[in-house]
Image (spheres, rainbow, N blue to C red):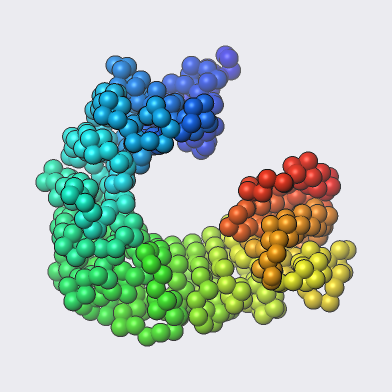
Amino acid sequence: MNLFWSLAPELIQKIGDEARFQDLKRMRLVCKLFSVLFQRKIYHCFDINIGPFGYPSSFENRGIQRRIDKLEALGREEHHPAKIFTKELRISTVWPPTVKPYTTPTDEEVKLFLELLVPALGSLKIISKLEWFNNLTVCDAVYSAVFECIKPMIPNLTSLKLSQIPTKIVGPTSKFNAPILILTDPRLPLLVNLHIDCGGEDPNQTTLLSLLTALSKLLCNSRTTLRSFKCLIPVHILGSRMPTIQSLFNLGTNEYQDAAITDFVTSPEFVRYVRSITPTIPHFKALQSLDLQAFGAYDSELHLPYQRHTFDLWTVMANTGIQLRHIKSDVVTKGLVDYISSYSGGLQELSVKSYGEENAEQPGKDLFTRALNFQHTSLRFLNVDSWDHKWHIFREELATTGVFVGQLTFSSLEELQIPVFIDSTMENISLQVLRGPTDGLPLDTKPNYIWILLGLVTQKERFPSLKKVIITARPPRFDPPEHPQDVELAFFKAATLRLCSYRFNSATPATSCSPIPAVIILFQDQAMRHEYTAVEISPGRWGYSSNSMRTYPDWDPEWEYSACTQAE
């Protein structure tokens, strides 16, 4: 114990800054010094997530009861640490506990719950970041009480996240007013972060226009301070009343120099419908990160890569000369590929997806054979996710061409996630997928692209900074699927055995200065997720550990353990 007291407080604080939250909760039990020094981080955020009570003595009930006990302690204890350190408040679910499982609470149960909830929320005086989920409860009394408790917090807010905002009025009482009242409150100060998410519901024009009006005024007031802006709003219903980007941000031609937004999250639908008056968007001069997230109903027209729209955000971005550092997009288009190719270096993170859209293979090929050539020196994180077999990310063509096979050096790349597709017959699985090269010789005439990819990315002279490789492979679709669970289970067992017995030689021996990256292979579908982490036991000799999360009741954990220890 004396050893801990001899540590410098600065060192302990650094440990706390780098440790995971769960580890912090354990470390604070070691000694009183740790408990005191870690309080600031442990109590920094207060999360209220109290769901409906289930059956007595259930695991869920015990977790809910612990959260209720924390609320009660916060309202009762005069010197509770949360009153000093809590600056973030997240309210997602607030459901009064009930005697009968999964029932609507009675008036008496609501009253008893509010007697501990209101004092707890009222004791939080220094909240600067609020995350509000509008569908937090089914009880009007609880909803109103929670909203009244957060009103005194509004003048101190610098970060505001409003989620699940309904844009249509349902029933005699609408819960839409709370987000509008927060956005239009004159006491709301200049914001640094603003996130608006409507949850994808069918919109009503009147309520949607009210939301956009309040949002536009707030964006104008905070234009010199706002750094992060997330906007997921179903604007397509407005028709001819659709706002332009200039009108939404309420910025004139002489005011764009003051716009400070660096991170912008929106949807392809928003980009499609909200036009720009000019061919460029000068208001986004400070932009560094752009995230396009799929939102609402799937629109096939949005996913036609080479369809000519009247407004192409990526073309507009190229006209501004802005060089983004972070790009995430749920839709890959020709414009995106051209934009990435329009400047050299600077892009640090690229995350793209493909949902099986028509004619999507060409952007995938262009991305890996052309666009990444311009960003290979600066790219730190590359994440590619695709459910479509037509996206030839790493198959026949890219096994012999493309940026990975060439001589380019990815000097900054730390994490790579990429899909590898699996053929659709059991014969091909046994011959092509589960068999990798042994002692440098292939077991069949057709190459195995998982092993080719592993051999490429473990070349330390080309990937000196690589720390993690995540290879995603989904199970094949069997036709006819008479017993799909049995077939898939057999496939995963065979895949595990093959991974555990596989060895390949590293191009450069691992040293303390150049460790071999952790290789994680994910076999996943909608029902399960299997994770195999490759560990180099000795130079050129690899073993795999497994962490599988599955829904199949007949899975044998003893088999999994024995299979994964064969590499030792």
Which is more toward the observer, 511 or 339?
A: 339
Which is more toward the observer, 560 or 416?
A: 560
Residue 144 visible somewhere in the drawing: yes
Residue 539 visible somewhere in the drawing: no
Q: How many marks?
A: 0
In percent of width and height, residue 147 lies at 22, 38
Q: Quadrant of residue 275?
A: bottom left
* Location of the C terminus (image quadrant): top right
Q: Residue at x 44, y 64 (%)?
A: 328
Q: Residue at x 79, y 45 (%)?
A: 559
Q: Quadrant of residue 155?
A: top left
Point out the residue furthest to the left here.
186
* Location of the N terminus (image quadrant): top right
In percent of width and height, residue 98 lies at 37, 29
Q: Is residue 409 above or below residue 318?
A: above
Which is more toward the observer, 402 or 359?
A: 359
In percent of width and height, residue 23 lies at 54, 32
Q: Is residue 255 above or below residue 177?
A: below
In percent of width and height, residue 281 lies at 27, 72
Point out the residue furthest to the top here.
2
Q: Is residue 301 above or below residue 419?
A: below
Which is more toward the observer, 405 or 14?
A: 405
Q: Residue at x 50, y 64 (%)?
A: 351
Q: Residue at x 46, y 33 (%)?
A: 54
